[in-house]
Image: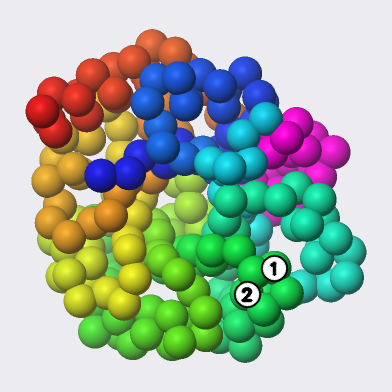
Amino acid sequence: MKIKICGQTSVEDADMSLSHGANFIGAVMDVDWSSRSLSEKQIRPIFEAHRERAFLLTFNAETTPAMEKTINALDPYAIQLTGRETFETVAFIKSVTRRPIFKSIHMFPAGGEKASDPEMILRLMDGYFRAGADGFVLDTIAKGMYGGTGVTNDWSIAALIAKPAPGPVFLAGGINPENVAEALGVPYIYGIDLASGVESEKGVKSGERLKALFEEINKTLA
């Protein structure tokens, strides 16, 4: 079970997340709606320190020569595409970056008026996989945000998706120390991915919350 702590905004928080037991970290670059988004200059030290375990998150990315240069300079372990990128865009980004691509797939909030359609999502995943995506992140769309919402999706539907999915699946959306044991019990997932659940405030990781999270994880997986 892999643990990814996303929304990193400083080397200190990235260090702390990894020291508590995270397998991967993630940092967001140039995403207008995200309060955790950083510029290339701000994000660079995180990747210089931890590039072999760091995901670079972008939104509706279009690979321009400038973006390709930035990705090569940051040299992330993987790229996470969090928007509504087309299959063609995913194929192009894969071809020019030659790095693992994880595609965010957006689900409706649990208990909301709309329910996510697993068959439709699996068709979408299959298209992205054939385009070059290596894995997926099942996240929640809420409050006009495509991730980092602190809102859970329907984990029973997530399990139906993760079992036949064409690549490894991270479960994301509203995971925290209080519900992580339940999240880890969702069958067929590759790992869990969280940001707000271990923050003291937006964009600032809490050592206390991280400690509580990994205590629960270790107890659950023991």
Distance (Cα) linking label 1 and label 2: 5 Å
Specify whether 187 is left or right of 166.
left
* Circle 1/circle 2 CB separation < 8 Å: yes
Corner quadrant of residue 65: bottom right
Disc 2 crowd, CA 10 A, few/some/many (<14, 14-19, 20+): some
Specify whether 25 is left or right of 107.
right
Viewer-closest of 202 and 211:
211
Q: Is residue 44 visible?
A: yes
Membership of 20 in magenta stretch: no
Residue labelled with disc 2: 94
Identify the amino acid type marked 2. Answer: Lys
Q: Position of residue 157 (x, y in %)?
A: 18, 66
* Residue span colored magenta: 28-48
Viewer-closest of 149 and 138:
138
Residue labelled with disc 1: 97
Q: Quadrant of the C terminus?
A: top left
Look at 25% across and 44% down and name the residue there. Answer: 1
Above or below, 91 against 148 in this view is below
Q: Position of residue 136 (x, y in %)?
A: 40, 65
